Amino acid sequence: MDKISLVESSKIEEKIEIVLRQTDYSKEVAREKLGQFNFDELAVIRDYFGINEKKEQKKITSINQAIYKQLRGHLDSAMYDYRERVSKGEVKKII
């Protein structure tokens, strides 16, 4: 699905001026680049300088964290099952 952006014509001229101040693009090239980047002047400037956007890295977990996460999930599900059985009256009382 294509991204569509709506920008006021007065804002377009302001964005072109920002791009012109930060790059050596002509006015026509700046307008074309803004069109390519959905009128995001920061993206145009990043492209001009060759700056790539950082991609979010997955959170690195240690082996201990993974073990405790699995253990906690198992204990939570066991407790949930026990509470369900208690509410249904299936648990025998120990005297």
Image (cartoon, rainbow, N blue to C red):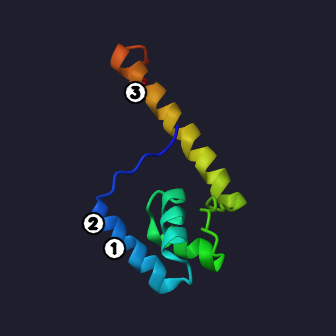
Mark earlier in primary sequence (2, 3): 2
Q: What residue is shown with label 3?
A: 83
Q: How far apart are marks 2 and 3 (CA)?
A: 63 Å
Q: Is residue 83 above or below residue 10?
A: above
Residue at left offset 55%, top offset 41%: 73
Label of residue 10 in the image: 2
Q: Position of residue 53 (x, y in %)?
A: 60, 68
Residue at left offset 45%, top offset 64%: 40
Q: How crowded is mark 2: few (under 14 residues within 10 Å), some or many (20 or more)?
A: few
Q: For the residue labelled by badge 3, is the local secondary structure a helix, a strand or a loop?
A: helix
Residue 29 location, quadrant: bottom right
Q: For the residue labelled by badge 1, is the local secondary structure a helix, a strand or a loop?
A: helix
Label of residue 14 in the image: 1
Q: Which amino acid does label 1 sit on?
A: Glu
Q: How crowded is mark 3: few (under 14 residues within 10 Å), some or many (20 or more)?
A: few
Q: What residue type is labelled 2?
A: Ser
